[in-house]
Image (cartoon, rainbow, N blue to C red):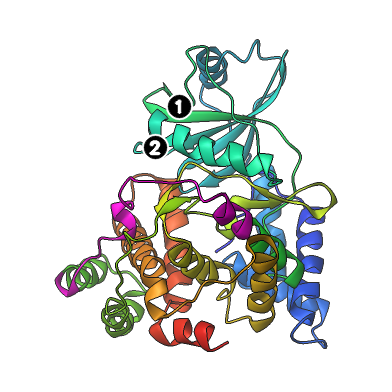
Amino acid sequence: MRFLPDKPSLGFLRKEAKDLLAALRESRPGTSLAEAQQALAGEYGLRDWAELKSETERRAAAVPTPPDGLADALVTAFGLGRVTGAVSPVAFTPMGRCWSITTDRGRWLAVTVYPWITNDQAELGTRLRDAAVAAGVAAPTPVRSPGGRLIETVREQSWRVHEWIEVGPSPVVPTPASVARGIGTTYGILHSLAIPSKTPVNPYLTARGDDVQWRDLLARARNAGKPWADQLAALLPAVSDLRGIEADVERGLILCNCALIPEHVRVGHQDKLVVTEWDFAGSLSPEQELGSALGHWALRPALNRTSIAAFREGYVQAAGRWPDLALASFAVAVTGWLNWTYNTICEAIDPSDAERAAFAEQEVVDLLRRPMTRASLQEILDT
């Protein structure tokens, strides 16, 4: 599911629609602009292009404002100087809202992060980020506070700051071949670094709920009167089937990004891909991370053979070889999808605030409409 920035423009949407048109024509040459506009609206969880335009106009008239004193607190915590311009909202993400702050020292992007992303975790990601940038990967420059920390607590939330860079939107889906090739190259570069990592794989990528927990989740959804409860019920056999895909994911570990997904990539200057998120970095094997990558970049909104071929081409060009993949190579992808789906449904049933409620409802509809299945993963391997 794509999410509009806080201040989208019709020009922004028209460019995305044209990008999507080019991507769709790679597999369906006769696709029209109207069809691309309709598909883009669907990616944003809206019925059609007219509704997408209306939502853009609504957002333009209701721009979020920062809490009083937040900007001053952030610039003090990170030593950014003196606020000299308006503080602008950028986008709402699952971790919270991002803000653009201008001071006498420059422009900055302040982002909230999950509480589990400690300074040590951020240091781990920055270690990989720095090595990747030295190898040619584009990424924002993190800011350290006067105390040398990457993460600071401001108003009971964890924050980090990056130097501002001008970037465009996330890549459209289906992934254009040029983007898929670039993402494959990025993965190949990261895996070629082969930075040793001895920490255990993040439990979020290894621990799965059982049938009892999913049945209880369905009961909660029905008790809450959720309109998608029957879709969740229909999905439970596929969930059980997915849990049969297992592997020893603690073998062959290196330091990996672990979250190089479309939402964490932006199109930068001269169409260079910019990887914006590194805080989820941790131990994985190249095979497991590739399984996860293909699930994100080649299955949205449906299997894309052109993207798979381009992704593999870019990876081999950077890494020299393509690892042997089997169904077990998708074990981490399966666990991540199951946990993300389960947790998003929990948030939709019992949201922590209104913005997260809206986010979760839209995301649940998309997850249930286009679920991961054993058959779709096998189709990737067959391709």
Q: Is residue 184 left or right of residue 165?
A: left
In magenta segment, residue 205: yes
Q: Is residue 173 visible?
A: no
Picture layout, residue 363 above or below residue 91: below
In the image, residue 102 lies in the stretch drawn in magenta: no
Residue 151 marker: 1
The image quadrant that residue 21 belongs to is: bottom right
**Rendered image quadrant of residue 31:** bottom right
Relative to the observer, which residue lies in front, 366 or 54?
366
Q: CA distance from mark 2 to mark 1?
A: 8 Å
Q: Earlier in the sequence, mark 2 or mark 1?
A: 2
Q: Are marks 2 and 1 in contact (CB under 8 Å)?
A: yes
**Quarter of the image where the N terminus is located:** bottom right
Q: Say which residue label 2 marks.
A: 117
Q: What is the tally of numbered marks visible in this picture? A: 2
Image position, residue 161 (x, y; %) = 57, 28
